[in-house]
Amino acid sequence: MSSTSGGSHDPPQNGPDALRARAEAGSDRFRTLPEPPDPDRLTTTQDVSPGPDPEGGRDADRDWMLRHGTP
């Protein structure tokens, strides 16, 4: 018998035991988390600037008050 024929010591490939073994092996990866990054070292790779004003410089609340608040 060759060693690649899949002896009885090999884990099962299908069935509930295989699913349980895969789930346990996968959950071991997340038992310890990596160290969180240092916030002081977090930087962007591109220059950032504030986005354009969505109201185009107008005060929508003031405009609404002037249209509907005065008789």
Image (cartoon, grey):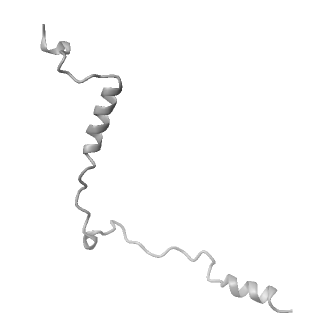
Q: Is residue 4 left or right of residue 23?
A: left
Point out the residue furthest to the right here.
71
Between 10 and 49, the one nearer to me in the picture: 10
Snapshot quadrant of residue 59: bottom right
Where is residue 14 shown, x and y percent of the image? 33, 22
Where is residue 39 shown, x and y percent of the image? 28, 71
Between 57 and 19, the one nearer to me in the picture: 19
Residue 61 vs 29, above or below: the answer is below
Residue 33 vs 7, above or below: the answer is below
Residue at 87 percent of width and 92 percent of height: 71
Snapshot quadrant of residue 28: top left
Point out the residue furthest to the bottom here.
71
Where is residue 5 shown, x and y percent of the image? 19, 12
Q: Is residue 14 left or right of residue 2?
A: right
Where is residue 24 shown, x and y percent of the image? 28, 38
Where is the N terminus found, in terms of image quarters? top left
Residue 68 vs 9, above or below: the answer is below
